[in-house]
Image (tube, rainbow, N blue to C red):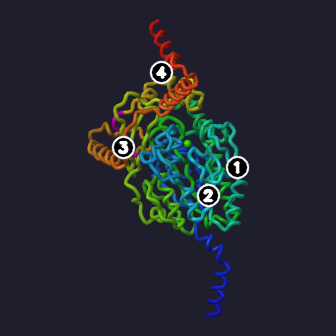
């Protein structure tokens, strides 16, 4: 007995370095780009898609059925993921906003706990604290993005050689437009499922098909990552997280508050620690950082997000009452809350209708803009198609959807007197959240504001260079020319 115990102690002493390294789990996050919840085989009620690896991962881990981002654009979603902060706290409401301060992110929190933290692929936020790992294309708009995992493997081997746990973020640009990757022949147009809020036409079907083909390659990336972890014998002590990011760049998707834009697929696999399950806990991107810090044994930071560990273990499904969602770009603004059953959207009275230039500008070369133009053409003779366009452009003050019965949010219950009480209740909850978060509607277009600022800076620089008070500034001359033209 004693001899056996001594042998055990000796063995423990011999193994002390690797045991220390193994105490903390490794993390691998695979992050999609512009992929709605509906793009995966493992969800209920999704579209036509081919994602066998992600579907397999879903059977091995916990899938969140109510997981949202706070703003359906790349930068707000990513900033929320990496910092655990919501837009009212960080100021990152849209792609045009810079963070209001220097906030700690995933890399700061995990490096203090001894982790090597790396990122390959798309950034869209300050990644200076992350080690840059080669392998995945950085630019989301590239026509021919590429990927391979040798840089990721090397990063992991370096961490192992230093006996350190690691966190590796694989930030794919699939399926951000342009939708140029994948085998489109796997997605015949007659097989494509057109969701009920869309106008059905060949261009729209093709848009859904080429997006789905790129999602299939995202699925290949997840499959290759799972294989690498298996080959390196790391699957058991690695928390593998898949996040689809915000929604597909189609109407009512990206740049909207609807589920097609803000509901994401979130899968978390930690073999032996988390039982495979589907949880209906309401969760958000801002919850990921506190979750990882708790799993790593650190002091959970006080941010807008809260650790999901209890929900992941199945101890609770009451994680948060509702998700808090903003939609703010180009001078247009909305707020929404979403619980397990209802989504409530508040669109305050404002000068502009919903207008998204990349989608609606007749000169836009994006494929999804071609689909929008097809809708407009069909609507010339089809009142149903016109109604679908109107509901996107003319947002009523209040919208209420039963997202369980109506996942595509086409039946606005706020117009039904039976739901007046529900509208009042959710409006009060949203207002209370706005007050708590010190949030308010803003009609400022960050791009226009930046342009004005640049013009003014240029003016000042020119005035300084010339040093001649008599010379008129470019802006003044431009204004004079404009005045003359108007007088004509
Ligand atoms: Ca995105």
60 or 334, which is in the foreground?
334
Report the residue marked by disc 2: 117
Which numbered tag is attached to residue 273? none
Q: Is residue 339 above or below residue 408?
A: below
* Label 1 Cα neighbours within 10 Å, binned few <14 / some 14-19 / many ≥20: some
Q: Is residue 140 above or below residue 277?
A: above
Query: Mark 1 vs ligand 1: CB under 8 Å?
Result: no
Is 369 part of what is drawn in magenta? no
Separation of marks 4 and 1 at Cα, in angstroms? 47 Å
Viewer-side label of 2, 4: 2
Measured as percent of width and height from the top left, residue 178 is found at 62, 36
Q: Main secondary structure of the magenta part?
A: strand
Regarding residue 259, the answer to whether it shows in the image is no
Q: Residue at x 62, y 67 (%)?
A: 236
User: Do the CB atoms of the residues marked 1 and 3 lie less than 8 Å apart?
Assistant: no
Point out the tag, 2 or 4, that comes first from the N-terminus.
Answer: 2
Point out the tag, 3 or 4, that comes first from the N-terminus.
Answer: 3
Report the residue marked by disc 1: 135
Separation of marks 1 and 2 at Cα, in angstroms? 16 Å
Asked where in the image residue 61 lies, by quadrant, the reply is: bottom right
Which numbered tag is attached to residue 344? 3
Q: Is residue 314 above or below residue 285?
A: below
168 or 216, which is in the foreground?
168
Q: Is residue 258 above or below residue 307?
A: above
67 or 382, which is in the foreground?
67
Q: As drawn, is 346 to the left or to the right of 96?
A: left
Viewer-side label of 3, 4: 3
């Amino acid at each position: 007995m004693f001899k056996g115990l001594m042998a055990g102690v000796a063995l423990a002493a011999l193994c002390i370095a690797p045991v220390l390294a193994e105490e903390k789990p490794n993390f691998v996050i695979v992050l999609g780009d512009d992929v709605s919840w509906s793009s995966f085989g493992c969800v209920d009620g999704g579209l036509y898609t081919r994602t066998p690896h992600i579907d397999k991962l879903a059977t091995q881990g916990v899938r969140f059925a109510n997981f949202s981002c706070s703003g359906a654009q790349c930068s707000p979603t990513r900033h929320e993921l990496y910092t655990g902060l919501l837009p009212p706290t960080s100021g990152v409401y849209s792609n045009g906003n810079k963070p209001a301060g220097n906030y700690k992110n995933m890399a700061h929190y995990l490096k203090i706990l001894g982790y090597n933290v790396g990122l390959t692929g798309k950034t869209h936020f300050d990644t200076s604290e992350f080690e840059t790992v080669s392998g995945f294309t950085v630019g989301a708009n590239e026509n021919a993005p590429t990927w391979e995992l040798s840089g990721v493997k090397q990063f992991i081997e370096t961490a192992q050689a230093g006996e350190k746990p690691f966190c590796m973020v694989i930030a794919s640009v699939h399926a951000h437009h342009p939708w140029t990757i994948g085998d489109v022949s796997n997605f015949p147009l007659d097989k494509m499922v057109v969701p009920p809020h869309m106008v059905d036409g060949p261009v729209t079907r093709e848009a859904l098909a080429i997006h789905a083909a790129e999602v299939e390659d995202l699925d290949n990336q997840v499959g290759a990552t799972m294989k690498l972890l298996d080959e390196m014998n790391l699957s058991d002590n690695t928390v593998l997280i898949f996040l689809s990011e915000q929604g597909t760049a189609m109407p009512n998707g990206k740049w909207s508050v609807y589920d097609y834009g803000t509901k994401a697929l979130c899968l978390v696999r930690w073999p032996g620690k988390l039982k495979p399950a589907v949880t209906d806990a309401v969760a958000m991107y801002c919850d990921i950082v506190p979750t990882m810090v708790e799993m790593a044994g650190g002091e959970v930071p006080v941010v807008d997000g809260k650790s999901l560990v209890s929900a992941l273990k199945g101890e609770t499904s009451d994680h948060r009452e509702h998700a808090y969602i903003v939609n703010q770009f180009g001078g247009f603004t909305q707020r929404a809350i979403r619980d397990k059953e209802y989504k409530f959207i508040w669109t305050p009275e404002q000068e502009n209708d919903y207008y998204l230039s990349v989608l609606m500008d007749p000169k836009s070369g994006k494929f999804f803009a071609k689909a929008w133009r097809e809708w407009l053409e069909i609507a010339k003779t089809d009142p149903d198609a016109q109604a679908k366009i109107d509901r996107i452009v003319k947002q009523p003050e209040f919208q209420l959807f039963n997202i369980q019965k109506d996942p595509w949010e086409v039946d606005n219950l706020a117009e039904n007197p039976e739901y007046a009480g529900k509208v009042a209740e959710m409006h009060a909850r949203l207002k209370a959240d706005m007050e708590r978060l010190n949030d308010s509607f803003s009609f400022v277009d960050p791009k226009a504001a930046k342009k004005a600022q640049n013009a003014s800076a240029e003016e000042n620089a020119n005035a300084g260079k010339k040093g001649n008070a008599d010379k008129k500034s470019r802006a003044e001359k431009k204004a004079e020319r404009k005045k003359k033209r108007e007088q004509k």
